Image (cartoon, helix red, strand yellow):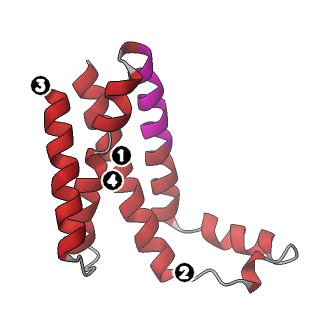
Amino acid sequence: MNWLMVAIIVGCTALGDLLQSFEMKRHVVTVEDLRPGRLPGMLARLAQRKFLLLAVFLMAISFFAFIKLLSIADLSFAVPVTAASVVIETILARLVLRESVTRWRWAGAIFVAAGVALLAM
């Protein structure tokens, strides 16, 4: 059950972050948009973005799965192991978003993966 929750958390977090990044790159938010008078209009435009709404839904699933994981597993396991989303997100950023990922970022992702592997033992 622990690993099922981890898979749900990691999958939903990675997909949610990917969709958020995709949408926010398509819809640039400026400092002007954050002024109190313009905020409702900006929020209304963002609410029309299907991928952004899906991202929020996926992040909610991730949150509730994390709450469930905390009820059945130790915090010292739950938080570090869900960092596996960093590895998945780095791969997706490169493949899907065509982002430039430096060697240092790849090294960091590999270290995170190694840490998650150590937790799995």
- What residue do we see at 52% from left, 57% from top? 53
Asked whether the beta carbons under mark 3 and mark 4 sit within 8 Å of each other, the answer is no
Q: Residue furthest top?
A: 72
Residue found at x 41% / y 55%: 16
**Circle 1/circle 4 CB separation < 8 Å:** yes
110 versus 47 height, above or below: above
Kindly identify which numbered label has been placed on residue 14. Answer: 4
Check the image and report above or below for 101 versus 59: below
Nearest the eye: 82 or 34: 82
Residue 114: x %, y % from top left: 14, 45
How crowded pointer 4 is (Cα within 10 Å; few <14, some 14-19, many 20+) is rated as: many
Q: Are marks 2 and 4 in contact (CB under 8 Å)?
A: no
SS label for mark 2: loop
Find the distance from the CA under tag 1 to the CA under tag 4: 6 Å
* Comparing labels 2 and 4, the label whose residue is closer to the camera: 4
Q: Amino acid at mark 2?
A: His
Residue type beneath disc 1: Cys
Left of 29 or right of it: where is 64?
left
Residue 101's mark?
Answer: none
Q: Spatial distance from mark 3 to mark 1, Cα to Cα?
A: 24 Å
Q: Nearer the viewer, mark 3 or mark 4?
A: 3
Residue at which label 3 appears: 121
The numbered mark, 3 or 4, whose residue comes first in the sequence reads: 4
Left or right: 26 with respect to 85?
A: right
Q: Disc 1 marks which residue?
A: 12
For the record, the magenta segment spans: 60-71
The quarter of the displayed image where residue 21 is located: bottom left
Q: Please name the amino acid that badge 3 sits on.
A: Met
Residue at mark 2 to residue at mark 4: CA–CA distance: 20 Å
Q: CA distance from mark 3 to mark 4?
A: 23 Å
Query: Element type at marker 4?
Result: helix
